Image (cartoon, rainbow, N blue to C red):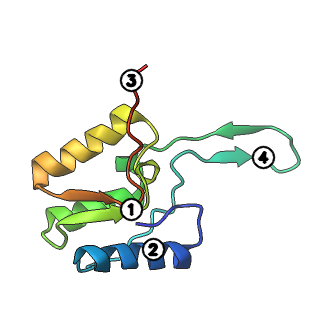
Amino acid sequence: MPSPGASPDEDWNTLHAEAEQHGYAIGARLHDVAVPVPTTYFPGSRTGRSVYTPPWQRPGWREVERQIRGGFAEGVIVLDRHNISSDDDEYHAVIKHLGERYKAFVHLVIPEEPTTPT
């Protein structure tokens, strides 16, 4: 699943190369067109507002779950964790849900940054 705001062709190439490198077969190419944390600017105005849509309310992620639930996919490859959610609790809930319920994997091309003790 490519980045919502990026060039799909560039992202597809990156995702495809990552899949090949790890021996994954690509069953479906899904693009989550809903940006996880978009900013909406109103025409003729200098104001904007942030709009957030949780992963399971976005068409792309609903389709990911449908593909996995239906046995058409064993997991999903995404560029980074922010393609799932920038919210830590929500991100971990998605990983847990897919892993525990479907035994599915989530592969990040750009790994999570390790947390450093403070």
Q: For the point 42% across and 57% down, which residue is it?
A: 110
User: Which residue is under mark 1?
Assistant: 109
Q: For the point 11% across and 46% down, which residue is it?
A: 100
Q: Amino acid at mark 1?
A: Val
Q: For the point 20% across and 42% down, which residue is it?
A: 96
Q: Give residue 71's quadrant in the image.
A: bottom left
Q: Amino acid at mark 4?
A: Phe
- Mark 1 and mark 3: Cα distance apart in space: 24 Å
- Mark 2 and mark 1: Cα distance apart in space: 8 Å
**Foreground: disc 4 or disc 3:** 3
User: Which residue is under mark 3?
Assistant: 117
Left or right for 29, reference 26: right
Answer with mark 1 or mark 3, whichever residue precedes in sequence.
Answer: 1
Decide: few, some or many residues near mark 4? Use Cα within 10 Å; few <14, some 14-19, many ≥20: few
Q: Give residue 67's quadrant in the image.
A: bottom left
User: Which residue is under mark 4?
Assistant: 42
Please give the label number shown on residue 14.
2
Where 37 falls versus 117 (above or below)? Answer: below
